[in-house]
Every structure is written in C-alpha cells, then in structure tokens.
Image: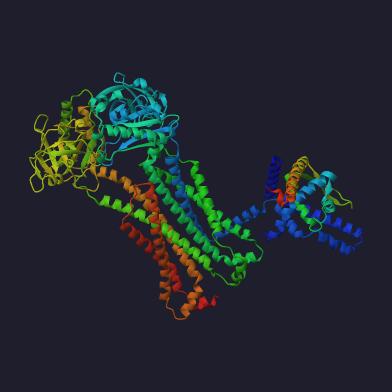
Amino acid sequence: MTPTHNSASKKTDVLQGTLALMVLKTLDVLGPLHGYGLARRIEQISGDLLAVNQGTLYPVLLKLEQEGAIESEWGASENNRRARFYNLTKTGRKALQSETQDWQQTAAIIARFFEIKSEDLP
Amino acid sequence: MSTNLFRNFRRFLNRLTNSASRAVDTDREARLREEIAEHIALQTQDNLRAGLDPIEARRQAMLKFGGVESMKEDYRDERAFPWFEHLLHDIRFALRMLYKNPGFTVVAVVTLALGIGANAAIFSVVRGVLLRPLVNRDEARLLYLCQSAPDSSDVNFSVPEIDDLTAHLKSIQAIGTLSPLDFTVVGLGDARTLTAGVVDGTYFDVVGLHPVLGRLIGPGDDGPKAPGVAVLTYKFWSTTLHSDPSVIGKTIRLGSFNGTRSATVIGVLQPSVPYPVETEIIANIVTSPHHLSATMVTGRMHRMTEVFARLAPSATLESARAELGTTYAAMRSAHSEDYKAEKGYRFTVTRIHDQINSRANTVLWVLLAASGLLFLIACSNVANLFLARTVRREPELALRAALGASTGALRRSLLAEAIVLCGAGLLAGIVIAAPMVGVLSRYASRFSVRAADLALDSSMLWIGVALAFVATIFLAFIPRLPSNNSQAFAVSSSGSRVTLGSRRRLRLFAVTQIAACFLLLAGAGALLRTLFVLENSQPPFDTARVLAINLPVMTDGRTPEQITTFYRDVRRRVASLPGVEKVSGAMIVPWRDALSFNLQMQFAIDGAPKDDGKDDPRARFRFISPEYFSTMGIPFLEGRDFNDNDRPGSEDVVIITEALAKQLFPGQDALNHKLHWTDPLLKFSGMNPGPRRIVGIVPDFDDTGIVPEPSMTIYQPSDQEGFSGRLFVRAKGDPYALIPVLTSEIHHMSDNQPVERASTLDDVRAEIMAPDRLNAIVFGGFATLALLISIVGVAGVLAFSVSGRIHEFGIRLALGASPRNILSGVLSEGFVIALIGVTVGTAAGFALVRVIAKYTAELQIPGATPLIAAAGVILAAALVASAIPAIRAASVDAARALRSE
C-alpha cells in the first residue's frame, strides 16, 4: 500500500507548476541539458527554490516528457559518463509561449492588486 | 487552452500505456536509478571542487537531492495511474476474499440482483408506456376534449354540442371527431365484429397520422352523398389480414345497429396508439346510417362522439382551456334544462399524451415507488451485511492503517469489494429483468394500449448500471474506517469488539428495511384482501354450465321482423341439439358486457303520486328472451316468464327484480302494477313511453359486479321491443364441447353470421377478476421478496450483535444468568427492531398517502385488517429471524467465552 505522503505532495503540487515553467524556459534559453545541469541553472536563477530536494525535479521532467513538451536521449556528461539529456520540443515551445503569456497576465493582475490603496476604491 | 488539453490528453495516454506494460516499468526504474546516480555524482564533483572532503562532498550531495524514496514514489505516481492499478489489485484481492465467503457473497449478489433487476424492468416499462413520445405529428399540440358526469355513462359529446363548442374558436386550428361503434364486417375473410370508428374528414389531419398504404379519409369523404370508404388500422391489417396489400380497393359491407352500407377500403393507417378505443377499422360517417339520422344530428343528449383538437400556432394549452371553458359555460347556460347542476357535468381539455397515460400513470408510478422501496431494502440489507463484515475486519483494517495505509487505500479496498458485488448483482439483475419486463408489460397493457408494443432496449441496461453505481458508492462509503484515534484501541482488542456507532448504523438499516417492507406488505395485503373477497363471492346462481355466445345482429338486407325471427329460430334449433338443456337470448352478457353498459334510466309507476321534490327512480333495463331465467338457473318468485305471445302489438310487459318490487311496493304485491319509462334518453332508444305491466318477479341478479349487490333491474322481452345479439346455452355436459356443433348449426342457417367469444359465465367472471389477480400477484410478489430480504437483514443484524457480545454473555452466564434470560434478551432485541420498523413504516405510510392524495383522488387507504396482518407477519418473521442468533447466544459456553479474551 502507498504510504501516506499527503502534506509532502501538496507542497510539490504548488512547486511543480512553477518548476515546470522554469524547466521549459531554461531549456529554451540554454538548449539540451541533463537533470543535474537543469537543477544547477534553476538554482542559480531562482535562488533557493531547489537548494534542497533537487530530486523533485525528476517527476516534473517525467510529466513534461509524457505531455510531449520535452524529449530526452542519452548523452555524455562532463565527467564522461552516460547522462540523460532533455531538449525542448515544438509542442514545448508553444506551451512555453502560451504559459509565459498566462503567467505575465496573472502577474500583471496581481501586481495591480498590490498597488491598490483604500482611497483608490470608490 | 487547446494545447493544454492536447498535452493533458497525451500525458493521459502515456500513463495509460505505461499502466499496461511491465517492460516499460522496469526500463523506467532503471533509467531513474541511473539519472539519480549521475545527478549525485555530478553534485559530489562540484562539492569536491568547492573544497569539501570526499565524504562530506557526497553527504552534502545526498542531502541536497532530498528523499530518494519519496521522490521515486512521486515519479511512479506520475508515470501511470497507481490508484487505478492498486484498485485492480484490490479487486483481485476482493474476488479471493469473496470466494472464501460464499454465503455472504451469494446473499449479497442475489439481493442486489433483485433490487437492480426489478427497478430496471419497471423503469423500462414506465419509460415505454409513459415517457415515450407518440407518433402523432407534433403531439404536444394535439388535445382531447372530454365531457363527463360522475354517475352517468354518457360521457363525451353530441353533434349539437360539438357545433356549439367549436364554432369560431381562435385557439384551436381544427377539430376532428371520431364515434366509436362496432361494425359487423363482411368481405374481409370470415364475417366478424370489428371495433370501429366513424370519423369526419378532418380527423386524420388533426391527429396527425399518415397512411402506410393508400390514402386516409379526407374532407372529400364528408357528407351524406359521399361514397363509403374505410381505412384499416395497422395491427388489424398486419395480423388478421397478414399485411395483404391487395385489400386496397376491396368493397366490404359494414353493418351497424341501424343498417348496413358498402364501403371501399382505401388505405392502411400507420402504427399508432388507438384512442379511446382499440379501433380495427375506421370509416367515414356515411357508412353508419345512425350517424346521419335526426336522432344523432339533433339530439343534444345523444352523446356518442369523441373530439380531438389541434392547437392554433399562436395558442397555448392554457389559452385553449380558457377559451373552450368559456364557450362551454355559454353553451350550458343557453341550454340550462339539459345540464342540470346535480348531474355534475365536467368539461376538461387535456393533451392527448396525458389523456392516454391518465390511467397508467398512477399505477406505474406506484409500482416504480414499490420497486424503489425494494431497491432501498436490498441496498440496506447488503450494506448491513457489508458493514457487519467490515466491522469484523476492523482489526485487519486497523493493522493496515498502522502499517501506513492511507484512508484512501483502505476505502479503495472496500470499494473493490463493492464493485465486485454490485457488478455481479448487475449482471444477474439484467438477466432477471428481461423476463420481468414481459410480465410487467402484460400487466401494464390493462391500463395503456402503449404497453403492447413494448420492447427491451438499452435504457434498461443504463438504469441497471446507474443503480449498481449508486449501490457501489453506498456500500463503499457507509462503513466507517478506523480513524487515527481508534487505531490503538482496535489493534489492542483481540477481535470483534464493535463500536457503538457501527451498531447504531446497523440497527438503522434494519429499521429502514422493516419499515419499507411493512409498507409493501400492507399494500399487498389490501390487494390480496380485495382479491379474496372477489374470489370467494359466488355467482348468485349456478352459472358454471352456461355458455355465453356473441351472435352480432346482421342487419344487412333484413327487416326487424326477420331479425327477430332469425334469433327465435336459432334458439329453437339450438335447443333441439343433443346435450343442450336450455337456450335463451339477451342483449348483453352478464359481467362482460354489463360493466360497460351501466346505464340506468328513470321510470315511474302508473297511478303513483308524483313527488315533485324528487327525481323519478332509476333502474337498469335488460332485453331478454323467454327462458332466460331458467337458463341462468334463477327461479321465479312470483308471476310468469315471458313467452312467445309477448310480441310486438300485444300488451307490453316487464319482469322486475325483488329489490325493485320491495322498494316500489313495500308491503304490497307488485304484480300487475304498471310502469313507464320517463327518462330523457328514452327518445334515443326507440322504446315507447307507454305503460308496461309487471308480470313476474325474480330474485336480484346483479350482472354488473362480481360481488352481488341488490339489483334494480327491469327486464323487457326482446322479441317485443328491443335488441338481441347474445345467446345463452345451459349444457348438460361439458359446455365447450357444444361450441363446434352450435357454430355449424348457426352457419347452416346463415353462413355470414359471426359466432364469437363463446365462453362459460364462470370463465367470464374469471376474466373480469384477472386484473385483480394480476395486481395481487405483482404486489404480493414484491412484498414477498421484500419480506425475505428483510428477514435475512434482521437475522444478520442480530447474528452480528450476538457474535460481538459472546464475551458479555459468557460473563453473565458465569454470574448465574440462565440461558433463557439471554435467549429472551436477544429475541426481544429483534422484536424491538421490528416494532420500531413497523411504527416508522406506519408513519411513513400515512405521510405518503397524504402526499399522493394531493395528486390523485383514486387512492384507497387500506383498512385496518391488512395493516394488522402485515404488522403481525413482520413481527413473526422478526422472531423467526432472531431465533437462530438467540439460540446461539444462549448456548454460549461461559468458560470458553471468558478464556477467548
């Protein structure tokens, strides 16, 4: 039977959405990367989002791959061992575009809300 | 959005294929392991570069990666549908568990099958009969007009009424009329009586039907000069005439009570619901001389016609009702003498669909409610057994929870069992539903012609699936799971210690079952009682060996005198046949025809003072031949029988029943007094209003009801004035053996004479009672099923309660309680459950009656006897059901029970 991991999975749910978008954007900018490379880049850019639990990246990668947004193949890593390299697909590029738009829209709306002062409201 | 949808779909497909394939599974696991190893290796390398010592570098890398196992778990969840996979696994487990518990499984599956099957069957009948649309074009705009009076058989409309009502209507586009009658038809195979209607030229357009062959009757066929034309209905054409297309163009002779006319068959009507009578042939008005006669055209009280109307495009049912209501009220006030207030005339306008359903509606919905109750009982019962099982499994469930199984996982294993049980119940239910639809549609065909062409369809399956789904959810989510707090307790206790909540729930289900069962039993009891009264009422006289035969009057080319002579000759020649004891004739067959010929006419005694405040007395009138009473086995109380001298021209005479004589002439001799008919309908009957002398008095012979009641009847000699058409033969031996001889003898005299529907009067009575018997069988069957299921339910609850209290019984026995105390304790527990159930059932029943009474007036509240009987049966059943667990409780071995802890 599956052990209980309710609280853990709830947190990752929130994380997964942003993480997926970060993965797509990183691959879009830097081209093919392996899991560790992706984790490093995301850590660099986002600060401590992936400072712990880098492992959570892998379920997200699998989800994106099953969606067809990214594809993967074996390649040689920096220390000349076999590593799985992930690359953005056409579908992934489209998804990134539409999701970037959505994200910006949402961000803009939220931003406007934060600017509101009580005297602005009629 | 669309790309999102597409991506989600792709992900779903991938997960689905992953679910199916084990190879992909191991492949992915290996790949993940390799990726993790490489990830940690690379991180370690970076850490080394940053100056950490090798051990610390690896440790930090591992820390940063996080929990490998929980990540793997997430990864696997993402890969496929683990929940679903586990469910499949659970179902396999459930199958094994249920296989090990055949008693529980069989009872549960059979119970569910009964509940699901009965509901699926009844619902498909309800759907087929009540909900299916009619074939008539735009049926929602087709209306039926109805005039009725509570104590009178003269419903519907006369020609003058139709003219008054339908002139200048704005809300009605067109009116079509149909007058039902019987035609004796010569020219379509054997001469026979057909149920027929004569219609005007707009009828078919108004009702919106098409021909399948030839054409229908149109406006060109109206008027007294038009040639006679006839349309056959589909059922008659396809069954009796074997769909013979050459019938079109045939000339046939249509005989009705005022003469015979020729008509050409011009078409066959599409299959449709015949209303208000099951017509086999429909002709234009000119084919019935009576319909062109002055009586018909000018008699305001001569009501023979049904009126159908089609709404104008802009009108609604409400506006048509309002307009027709106003017109009707205006007509009534213009002819107030013909519509006396005390007659209680009512005028209604309904959609034809509702009109056709009106009789079936109540019955079928009640039946559906009954089957709903059965479903409720079945579900509660299985839920009960299921709950009991779950409670017994509580230690197991608690153990699994303690080992880390989530609530969802435990619920899923219950769901798996519920799915298996309900799935099996559904399959078995569908198997039993198919034949049930057959029985039910036969039952429903009494109320609605629509039941005849009912077919099994997929809707039944869907209903079954829906019900099984409801039952599954019900079963899986009723039992309470061990909560976190109860885990310690449940695990520590050695076995079946039962929580109070579960027990309360078990009792609740038992009470629900008993209450529902009580309702069904009480209903069935009331029906059985009706049937019992009918079955036990004997015909007043010995009618077992009396054969009744229809010999429809053939007017074709005969004068009334010739017709009278023909019937007299028939009686004479049949009387001379071997095996025949007595022969007589009459106009109607008791019970069979009499129920639809319930007209009572007013009359007065000659010389009696006229009481202005009161209406004249009423009596049924019957036309009979000499020897009628001796054929029926009825003795004369006084006076004489009719004889051959009572003919046209001689003195008019009557015979009256005892009840009538006593009421009219209390304390005196009624013989030789005279009476005359005064009823306004007399002028349409062709009888003269002159005085008639009472020549005989006979015992009451109630030919209208199965249970005999005092009967006010006046008999007139059919040879003197009136109609014949039925022959009665008292046989010396087997009455049915006489039929072939009789038929050939009559055909010998006139080969066109139909000889129809021969059966003994006893069988006629059985035929009349058949609906009541069917009623009782259907509801009694339901109630029996419900009772059986409930007994299993109560026994289950008590057995469970006893098994949970073995320890307690052990202590009580050890402390000196006698087994008898314990026995009666358990028995009384069962009895109390049943008692509460009956009380709840009674309360619910009265509430239900109140609700239903708002919608229909024809509800009868069962008397006290069936209620008490039902309560008695249930309480007795509850005691029987409690007996086994009670005996088990009383035979507990104190030492063993205590040691088991």
Give B719 or B522, whichever is nearer the viewer.
B522
Give B33 or B223, whichever is nearer the viewer.
B223
Q: Position of residue B37 (x, y in %)?
A: 82, 56
One can see residue B581 in this view = no
**Residue located 62% across and 70% down the image:** B488
**How many circles with numbers are drawn on the protein?**
0
Above/below status of B383 relative to A106: below
Q: Position of residue B507 (x, y in %)?
A: 47, 64
Q: Position of residue B701 (x, y in %)?
A: 18, 44
Give B761 or B401, whichever is nearer the viewer.
B401
Give B747 or A115, whichever is nearer the viewer.
A115
Q: Residue B164 falls in which quadrant of the image?
A: top left
The colour scheme of the drawn protein is rainbow
Question: Is A10 on the left-hand or right-hand side of B546?
Answer: right
Q: Residue B91 falls in which quadrant of the image?
A: bottom right
Outermost residue toward the bottom in this view: B815
One can see residue B63 in this view = yes
Quarter of the image where the C terminus of chain B is located: bottom right
Q: Position of residue B10 (x, y in %)?
A: 70, 43
Quarter of the image where the N terminus of chain B is located: top right
Above/below status of B828 relative to A77: below
Above/below status of A50 relative to B700: below
Q: Residue B34 falls in which quadrant of the image?
A: bottom right
